[in-house]
Image (spheres, helix red, strand yellow):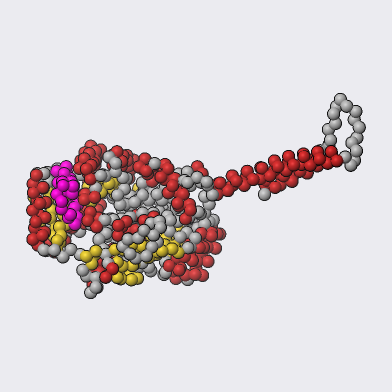
């Protein structure tokens, strides 16, 4: 070591030093065999040897502290330099992976690679699209193959981004460390592993979609009375929903993914396979590792099996909708139902009048024309029709106090689908309407964002944000959709690429408003790269430093979905690149950033 070499050089010099005599005394050569001189040599040598040892130990301690910090958290400044595989190393890794999974598991198809890199409906796009993309897509067939792939990637420092539904909105699957990056696809991991109807749980592979799971249950003799309630956007798969802690319209009654996952099988960065717990509904056995991975967006491990809770479907469920003169009236109605009525409805959703108009003008919305007013949507369930009627009576009375204009009820499942279609088609109806209201109809961009606030602040936040958007030039160019039952609101802003910066400032104000009222920058979309910058204000530096410590403990080479949620490289400038608003065309849809 460096300390040892210094010590040797110092000792060598010590033994060659001339003996200095007293300048005022007679210069008589010392006796050759004087014991006092031997002692002097030893004393001087000891001093230098001790100094060298101290330097060596000190350097060793500093190096150890850098690699294994003695503090509880990891600040950005404490991070070591980040290096990933070069071209030759990456190719060596691919050859090793082929030996495990076979060539047929790899795809270099250009169109497929584009789909893994970006999507036209995403809010954030790669600033450097020719670099920030995977070089290859690998589709493993089981947990063992995932483990083998990660062992190789860990050893060679190859970044990996896992994906399934590719429906995330905040850049969660962006390959920020491409092009020597692997997209790990769950296309072949899309089966039900074990179904336990008596225990109300089911174990699935990561590529199973929530809507496909619903079809599976409805078609099963033992499962047609059961429901997996978490229902985010169409196309979302169970693993992705775990990664972002997704929810949906049913979260008001049934909760989010955090409340509906029993256990996980996870492959860690070095290939280690763990199962977070057994199958009971409750457990106090050690740390809650299951919740650690929910919401981690693939940065801590690759999920290969998920055991989720099932619920008994309502014996009967109908839909009611109520329109109001203002969005504040609609929000106030929802707040009273949630906090004062004593009812536990199955779902409460809100749309603003612009969203309703988008739905009415959409070719995919089913044909029914809704009143173009702020509207609440209710799912009301119970064992009998009379039980539902009693709840509807209470809801209608509260709505009447808040100036309801029109109140409609469904009477069967077919009418349920028609009334609920306005809520389900909100996103795509908004996107479709962009070419009718924007200056450049060939450059339709959509900024989809969500916030969540305490229930008592929902009405105020929606009203203030609605006013801000209208005053900022977005009148007729934005939609409001909310899981208002749990305080989660979605705002969809239509814009042309040239207006990126003004749109970004408007969204910044929206998030700041939510935080001011004790809310969060994201209720269910997750952080990805798009909302990293808000977390310092929301959670504080120390909380992010603790997350970074957990990340580095489980993924020391930082290969798993790099740069998501928080900064892992003190030298990266991703936030600045995203804020710069580069314009990039990825396909027939021109995308901003």
Give the residue drawn at x 30%, y 60%. Answer: 260
- The magenta segment is 327-356
Q: Relative to the observer, which residue lies in front, 475 or 249?
A: 249
Q: Residue at x 48, y 63 (%)?
A: 271
Residue 237 percent location from the top left of the image: 32, 62
Residue 541 at what x, y percent from top left? 42, 41
Residue 128 placement, left or right of 429: right
Residue 485 in view here: yes
**Depth order, front residue of 172/382:** 382
Identified at 47% across, 63% down, the residue is 272
Dividing the picture into quarters, in which one does residue 453 lie?
A: top left
Does residue 238 lie above or below 14 as drawn? Answer: below
Question: In the orientation shown, which residue stands out farthest toward the front?
Answer: 35
Tell me which residue sits at (29%, 38%) in the image: 516
* Depth check, front residue: 290 or 305: 290
Vertical order, 41 against 146 (above or below) = above
């Amino acid at each position: 070591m460096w300390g040892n070499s210094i010590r040797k050089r110092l000792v060598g010099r010590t033994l060659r030093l001339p003996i200095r005599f007293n300048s005022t005394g007679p210069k008589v050569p010392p006796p050759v065999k004087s014991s006092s001189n031997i002692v002097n040599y030893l004393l001087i040598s000891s001093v230098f040897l001790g100094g060298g040892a101290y330097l060596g130990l000190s350097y060793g301690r500093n190096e150890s502290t850098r690699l294994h910090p003695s503090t509880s958290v990891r600040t950005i400044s404490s991070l070591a330099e980040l290096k990933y595989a070069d071209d030759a190393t990456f190719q060596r890794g691919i050859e090793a992976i082929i030996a495990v999974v076979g060539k047929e598991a790899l795809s270099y198809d250009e169109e497929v690679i584009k789909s893994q890199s970006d999507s036209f409906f995403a809010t954030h796009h790669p600033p450097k699209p020719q670099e920030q993309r995977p070089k290859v897509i690998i589709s493993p067939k089981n947990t063992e193959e995932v483990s083998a792939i990660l062992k190789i990637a860990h050893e060679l420092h190859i970044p990996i981004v896992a994906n399934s539904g590719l429906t995330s909105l905040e850049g969660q699957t962006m390959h920020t460390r491409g092009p020597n990056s692997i997209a790990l696809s769950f296309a072949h991991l899309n089966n039900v592993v074990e179904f336990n109807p008596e225990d109300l749980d089911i174990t699935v592979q990561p590529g199973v979609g929530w809507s496909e799971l619903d079809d599976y249950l409805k078609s099963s003799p033992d499962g047609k009375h059961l429901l997996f309630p978490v229902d985010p956007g169409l196309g979302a798969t169970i693993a992705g929903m775990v990664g972002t802690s997704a929810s949906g319209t049913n979260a008001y009654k049934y909760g989010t993914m955090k409340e509906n996952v029993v256990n996980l099988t996870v492959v860690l960065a070095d290939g280690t396979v763990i199962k977070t717990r057994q199958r009971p509904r409750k457990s106090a056995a050690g740390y809650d590792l299951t919740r650690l991975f929910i919401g981690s967006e693939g940065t801590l491990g690759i999920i290969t099996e998920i055991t989720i809770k099932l619920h008994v479907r309502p014996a009967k469920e109908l839909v009611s909708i109520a329109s109001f003169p203002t969005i504040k009236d609609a929000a106030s109605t929802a707040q009273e139902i949630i906090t004062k009525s004593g009812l536990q409805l199955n779902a409460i959703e809100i749309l603003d009048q612009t969203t309703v108009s988008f739905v009415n003008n959409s070719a995919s919305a089913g044909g029914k024309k809704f009143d173009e007013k702020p509207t609440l949507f209710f799912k009301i369930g119970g064992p009998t029709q009379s039980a539902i009627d009693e709840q509807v009576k209470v809801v209608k009375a509260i709505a009447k106090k808040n100036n309801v204009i029109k109140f409609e009820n469904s009477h069967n499942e077919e009418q349920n689908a028609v009334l609920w279609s306005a809520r389900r088609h909100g996103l795509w109806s908004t996107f479709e309407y962009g070419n009718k209201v924007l200056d450049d109809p060939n450059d339709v961009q959509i900024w989809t964002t969500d916030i969540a606030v305490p229930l008592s602040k929902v009405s105020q936040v929606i009203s203030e944000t609605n006013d801000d958007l209208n005053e900022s030039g977005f009148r007729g160019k934005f939609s409001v959709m909310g899981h208002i039952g749990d305080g989660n609101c979605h705002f969809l802003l239509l814009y042309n690429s040239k207006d990126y910066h003004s749109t970004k400032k408007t969204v910044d104000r929206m998030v700041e408003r939510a935080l001011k009222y004790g809310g969060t920058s994201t209720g269910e979309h997750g952080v990805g790269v798009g909302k990293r910058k808000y977390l310092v204000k929301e959670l504080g530096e120390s909380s992010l430093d603790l997350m970074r410590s957990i990340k580095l403990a489980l993924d020391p080479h930082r290969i798993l979905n790099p740069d998501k949620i928080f900064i892992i490289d003190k030298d990266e400038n991703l936030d600045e690149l995203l804020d710069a608003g580069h314009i990039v065309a990825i396909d027939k849809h021109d995308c901003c950033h």
